[in-house]
Amino acid sequence: MLLLSTTFTYVRTKVADLRTREDGVTAVEYALMVAIIALLMVAGFFLLFNNVSTAFTDTGSCVTDVSTRGSAGC
C-alpha cells in the first residue's frame, strides 16, 4: 500500500509540475494559428473553385448551345 501511495504522490506532483510550466504554451498557440489559417485557406480555395467552375460551366454552355446566342445570360 505504501508503494501505491508513493507512486500516486509522485505522479500527482509530476502532473502538477507540468501544469505550471509554460514552455510549451507558445508552441501550442502557433500550432492553433497554423491550423486556423490552413482551415481558412482550404475554405477559401473551395469557394473560389466553386465560383470559377460555375463561370466556366456557364460559359461553356453558352458556347455550345447556339440557341442562346444573344440572350442576356450569354
Image (cartoon, helix red, strand yellow):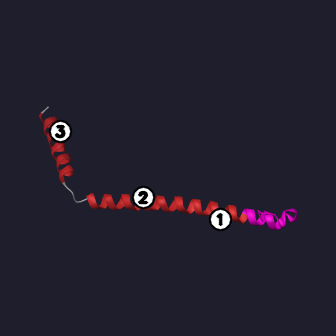
Residue 42 location, x and y as percent?
52, 60
Mark 2 surroundings within 10 Å by alpha-carbon count, few (fewer than 14), some (14 through 19), many (20 or more): few
Residue 68 location, x and y as percent?
84, 63
Q: Name the residue rendered at 18%, 51% in the picture.
A: 20
Mark 2 or 1: in front is: 1
Residue under circle 3?
A: 8
Q: In the rendered structure, does residue 65 fall within the stretch colored magenta?
A: yes
Which residue type does callout 1 highlight?
Val
Q: Name the residue rendered at 63%, 60% in the picture.
A: 50
Q: Looking at the rendering, in which quadrant would you find the C terminus?
A: bottom right
Residue under circle 2?
A: 36
For mark 3, give the secondary structure: helix
Q: Quadrant of residue 5?
A: top left
For mark 2, give the secondary structure: helix
Residue 28 appears left or right of 15: right
Residue under circle 1?
A: 52
Decide which of 50, 62 is in the foreground and name it: 62
Q: Name the residue rendered at 42%, 58% in the picture.
A: 36
Rounded to the nearest angstrom, the CA distance separating label 2 from label 3 is: 38 Å
Mark 1 surroundings within 10 Å by alpha-carbon count, few (fewer than 14), some (14 through 19), many (20 or more): few
Which residue type does callout 2 highlight?
Ile
